Amino acid sequence: MSGSCSSSCSSASTCGTKEAQQAQAAQQENAISRSLGKIKHKILVMSGKGGVGKSTVSVNLALALANNGHKVGLMDVDLHGPDVVRMLNLQGTLQPSATPDGLIAPLQYNDNLKVVSLEYMMKDRDEAVIWRGPLKMQAIRQFVGDMDWGNLDYLIIDAPPGTGDEPLTVAQIIPLVKAVVVTTPQQVALADVRKSIRFCKAVKMEIVGVVENMSGLVCPHCHEVVEVFKSGGGEKTARDFDLPFLGRIPLDPQVVSGSDDGVPYLASGADSPAAQAFANVVKAIELRLPPGKPSGPLPMAGCPCASV
Ligand SMILES: Nc1ncnc2c1ncn2[C@@H]1O[C@H](COP(=O)(O)OP(=O)(O)O)[C@@H](O)[C@H]1O
Ligand SMILES: [Mg+2]
Ligand SMILES: [Zn+2]
């Protein structure tokens, strides 16, 4: 992706002048609003720490919603670790193509799931690591404004850990985006998750709820869940902040092999406590953000669906 002139810029002589830049920015603003107008629910998957399974949750959530018959987009804005394309085994199809109206067609994973990753837009993957704030923001704006997402029930956004440029840009350019916060049961992750929750409050992003991933281990022999770390911390944190708890997903060795092989866990026909746990988390999210309804404020605490 080039950080300079977009293909929509028609005047070479004025390109780079303040007026041309303003006109381009206004045009992009319109494109972003038009694109977002067709998307019912926008979900930013966040975590305080890396390695807690945020991309795994994003990919499997997107896939499960698509399997449930909804139209879903999956946007990977983790510019430093764009894993989504690998997890879905889409590496061979990294050729962006233009639609007749000048937009870029996202990758099509299946009839219901479209995917965009920085990796898809970049010639050289290593480019991303040197990207600084403004360039990252521009990339994310293009992911929304220049993509032909069409009508979607859900757009799932996988952001890098923490509260840096990417989640901030998403919160700023996507009105009504809501956060799903992923954590693990350990204390460090929990301290970080509090920071994420405070960030959401500071930027006025509503939180759909908290997911506790890697909570217990699915025994490969008897398939029972064994407690490894003290679990329940995610639920407690959710309660402390008066947030819905969306569920616990145990560690399951099959999840790792699935994402390494490009076959996401929920596409592998897995039938285990982890698959059931993922399904419950998805159900909780569908209940809080019903696919048929446009995005609005979340239900008040006290509604049955606020305490899933
Ligand atoms: N519930 C789980 N059980 C087993 N492995 C998991 C689970 N969730 C995630 N993983 C594995 O943990 C690693 C980190 O997950 P990833 O989704 O890349 O984290 P993040 O995006 O938060 O950095 C990956 O190898 C992934 O397959
Ligand atoms: Mg990730
Ligand atoms: Zn066992």
Image: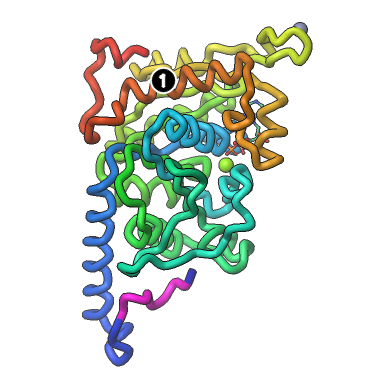
Residue range (magenta) = 2-9
Specify the quadrant of the image occupied by residue 21.
Answer: bottom left
Which quarter shows the C terminus? top left
What percent of the width, then of the height, locates residue 297?
A: 22, 30
Residue neighbourhood size for the residue with mark 1, other residues' Cα within 10 Å, grouped as few (<14), some (14–19), many (≥20): many
Q: Residue at x 31, y 33 (%)?
A: 201
Q: Nearer the viewer, residue 273 or 109?
A: 109
Q: Main secondary structure of the magenta part?
A: loop
Question: Which residue shows up at 59% across the image and 66% down it?
Answer: 127
Give the answer, above or below, for where 8 lies relative to 162: below
Of residues 284 and 13, which is closer to you in this image? 284
Kind of residue at disc 1: Lys
66 relative to 130 in the view: left or right: left
Residue located at (60% from left, 47% from top):
83
Q: Residue furthest front?
A: 111
Task: Please tell me whether mark 1 sits on a helix, a strand or a loop.
Answer: helix
Q: Nearer the viewer, residue 235 or 90?
A: 90
